């Protein structure tokens, strides 16, 4: 897809990203720096936890989701500039999982004060190799009209 | 603080974490892997972008927030197990910013089906050295009662 401006977008527009394999070593490296909790770092501790086995940090799943979106999601002309959104982790990401993201525009809210911009709501569903969602992020993306 | 079970928590409970300095090199390293967009990687491109200067990926701010919460936030007895939440990035994190997180329990929802557990809503406000919020994450945390 070529770069898309606000004028080019419509509710229902979809993209499916490439894939990313979650390696056990990367899960532990990410967690040791950013989410140092035993169930993300140690197999035995993870087995005894609510996760019943090693699980990636949700923030690692989120970071990988961003990589997939930025490299092969909806190609917003000014980049994917997120203002925030609603995040859900319905199940953990496991070592060896291969993730991809289904992206869908679910709303477009024109700015009242700035006629050249708007907020695009995009539902980004991150799925594992079994088609099970591991993350749903309904993002608010800042988007701009094509320059005159 | 000692480890806290669901029974120990109440609305209004607060914690303030330690601090974390966002180094320019780490901002670029994180972005090159997880959010490879020019405004997170290159000073000149960032100056020309909506950010008007190099900005950390919001997911990097989120990951650092998790580190601060996991190491010095509210000490949930079963760990900080997030089910999701509402995320806002009101302003970017800049190279050299020193972040900390103010955590506050704003709601406790007992499970109807599982009497030993509940969901704790925690507002985690990540602030820079000027006291300006760079992220607000209203998290849903799974929490358990003290074992009988």
Image (cartoon, coloured by chain):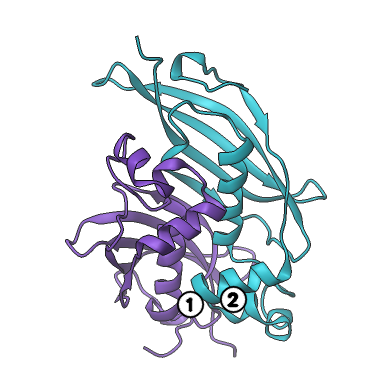
Chain colours: A purple, B cyan
Within the image, what quadrant is residue A126 found in? bottom left
Instruction: From the image, tell me which residue sits under label 1.
Output: A6
Within the image, what quadrant is residue B55 found in? bottom right
Image point (40%, 57%), residue name: A138
Structural crowding at the residue carrying mark 1, measured as other residues with C-alpha within 10 Å and reported as few (<14), some (14–19) or many (≥20): many
Query: From this viewpoint, which residue is outermost toward the top?
Result: B148
Image disc number at residue A116: 2
Labels 2 and 1 touching (C-beta < 8 A): yes
Query: From this viewpoint, which residue is outermost toward the front?
Result: A44
Chain to which the residue tagged by mark 2 belongs? A
Tell whether A91 sits left or right of A143: left
Tell whether A73 sits left or right of B69: left
Secondary structure at numbered mark 1:
helix
Query: From this viewpoint, which residue is outermost toward the left?
Result: A130
Mark 2 and mark 1 lie on one chain; the one further toward the N terminus is 1
Can residue A68 be seen by looking at this rendering? yes
Secondary structure at numbered mark 2:
loop
Image point (20%, 65%), residue name: A129
Tell whether B118 sits left or right of A109: left
Can residue B55 be seen by looking at this rendering? no
Image point (55%, 45%), residue name: B137
Instruction: Calculate the distance from the C-alpha at mark 2 to the C-alpha at mark 1.
Output: 8 Å
Tell whether A94 sits left or right of A119: left
Image point (40%, 62%), residue name: A25
Asked if B142 appears above or below B136 in the picture, the reply is above
Residue nearer the viewer, B77 or A15 = B77
Within the image, what quadrant is residue A137 found in? bottom left
Q: Are marks 2 and 1 on the same chain?
A: yes
In the rendered image, residue A65, in percent from the top left (x then y), is placed at: 40, 65
In the rendered image, residue B128, in percent from the top left (x then y), is placed at: 75, 51
């Amino acid at each position: 897809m070529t770069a898309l401006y606000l004028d080019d977008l419509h509710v229902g527009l979809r993209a499916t990203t490439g894939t990313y394999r979650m390696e056990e070593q990367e899960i532990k490296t990410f967690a040791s720096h950013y989410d140092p909790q035993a169930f993300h770092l140690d197999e035995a501790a993870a087995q005894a936890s609510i996760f019943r086995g090693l699980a990636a940090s949700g923030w690692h799943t989120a970071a990988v989701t961003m990589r997939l979106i930025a490299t092969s999601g909806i190609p917003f002309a000014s980049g994917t500039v997120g203002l925030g959104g609603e995040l859900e982790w319905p199940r953990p990401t496991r070592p060896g999982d291969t993730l991809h993201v289904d992206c869908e525009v679910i709303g477009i809210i024109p700015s009242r004060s700035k006629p050249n911009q708007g907020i695009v709501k995009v539902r980004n569903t991150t799925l594992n190799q079994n088609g099970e969602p591991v993350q749903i992020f309904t993002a608010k993306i800042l988007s701009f009209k094509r320059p005159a």
